[in-house]
Amino acid sequence: MAARQVAAAGAHAILFDEKMAWEKPCGGGVTYKAYRQYPFLEKSGSVRRVTRTCLHSPGAGAVSLTLDKPMLIFSRRELNQLLLDRAAGAGAELRRERVLGMRREAERWAVRTAAGEVKADFVIVATGARNPLRDTGTAFQAADTMTALGYYVPREQGHIDLEFFGGFEGYLWVFPRAGHLSVGICGKGEAATEMRARLERYMESRGISREGATFYGHMLPSLEASSWRGNRLAGDGWLAAGDAGGLVDPVTGEGIYYAMRSGELAGTLAAEGREAEYAGAVTGEFVHDLAYASTLARRLFLGRYLFGANTDRMIQFLRRSTRLNGIVQELFAGTMPYHDLRKQIKSTLHLTLTEIGVNLFLRRIVSEGNE
Ligand SMILES: Cc1cc2nc3c(=O)[nH]c(=O)nc-3n(C[C@H](O)[C@H](O)[C@H](O)COP(=O)(O)OP(=O)(O)OC[C@H]3O[C@@H](n4cnc5c(N)ncnc54)[C@H](O)[C@@H]3O)c2cc1C
């Protein structure tokens, strides 16, 4: 996204990526918010459009939601290729090389790869969560990341499954992709071996065989509320976009949209010589809200309401409340800022509880599911 903007503005953009299009460990889920803003995403041939989602927890059973705004699920190899083609189409030069280091020389950069050195006026760092260019981008502390791991399973299904566990700060997903499933788990505060065991127990309980499946593991930025302050998004001659800037939703783990949007902003502003505005622009547009979401994530996953885990209550209430269903739809679509979501939940809580009470009394279920 950044290279495309720079090249489209008429500057010489060189995009270095050591792997180019590859199956980056990822669910590949793209929200309505993302494809509304970038309609070219919807036109990709191999994308899956998924409308049915099933939420489950051992304590509350299941509830099924039909998403008003479907989620698109990509193979990351194809999403990456799509974005690379767009950058090349705008005139960016693509080089499949690893950047080994960068040195600041007067007002320029010397960017070093195995093939030699390139001089650059400006650098946009989009090297992901395991950014090896340590002096640029977010300086992650251990608490600022989630572990994310899973399997690509050669199997088909038409819907998304999400599993919550009371007392675990994270969740498990089954995403249907073209030709296979991405079955994974992400979370904080638990060792990777325990999370993998949790995931494998789930797969066994659902009859999802690991035979022929490929394991993947990676880290996912999940900045603590305090780490957003002072987060390094920009410096002398550089900007950081995407995971390299920690730009991931700490509740849902959504990072593709934020990587695309921050890359686009970084490229546009750098090409116009307005790079000083970048940190303020991303902060105003979404960092404030992501920072607020950091304060909610732990409460959502680990908190309790009416003597039960919040996630259990969410599933139970979803079965009985159209009002809550509407709010959760917004969460899946990514269209409502967390500030507004929280406000709406609080201001309508009494109405939601009344609706649940009435529907319990009438034994009426508004979203199907089982206890
Ligand atoms: C298991 C898992 C599941 C996820 N699921 C979802 C999901 O369903 N939906 C969603 O929105 N987000 C999801 N995310 C988050 C999402 O994958 C990231 O937020 C997103 O990929 C960030 O994009 P990026 O371009 O910043 O970094 P990346 O996609 O990590 O890309 C970084 C690129 O930099 C290259 N690179 C790194 N170092 C160098 C170097 N020194 N020289 C040259 N090239 C280099 C790499 O080859 C790579 O191609 C998930 C993450 C994980 C780990």
Image (cartoon, helix red, strand yellow):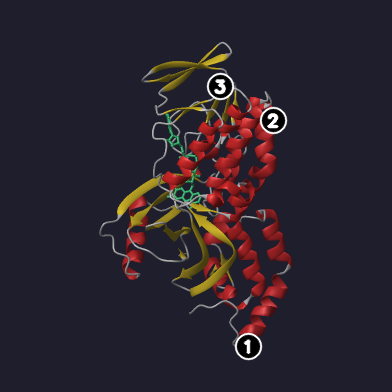
Q: Position of residue 113 (x, y in %)?
A: 40, 21
Gap in Å between the C-alphas at discs 2 and 3?
A: 21 Å
Looking at numbered disc 2 in the image, what kind of residue is underneath it?
Glu
Q: Position of residue 15 (x, y in %)?
A: 49, 28
Q: Position of residue 36 (x, y in %)?
A: 63, 51
Q: How many labels were placed on the picture?
A: 3
**In the orientation shown, which residue stands out farthest toward the left?**
211
Numbered badge on residue 277:
2
Numbered badge on residue 361:
1
Location of residue 276 (image quadrant): top right
Q: Position of residue 45 (x, y in %)?
A: 48, 52
Contact (Cβ within 8 Å) of mark 2 with mark 3: no
Lateral position of residue 197 relative to residue 167, left or right: left
Gap in Å between the C-alphas at discs 2 and 1?
A: 55 Å
For mark 3, what is the residue? 12
Looking at numbered disc 1 in the image, what kind of residue is underneath it?
Phe
Number of residues whose C-alpha sits closer than 10 Å to that of mark 2, classed few (under 14), some (14–19) or many (20 or more)? some
The residue at the point 61 percent across, 36 percent down is 264
Quick one: label 2 or label 3, which is nearer the N terminus? 3
Quick one: label 2 or label 1, which is nearer the N terminus? 2
The residue at the point 43 percent across, 71 percent down is 58
Lateral position of residue 55 relative to residue 216, left or right: right
The residue at the point 71 percent across, 60 percent down is 343
Between 222 and 28, the residue placed more toward the observer is 28
Q: Nearer the viewer, mark 2 or mark 3?
A: 3
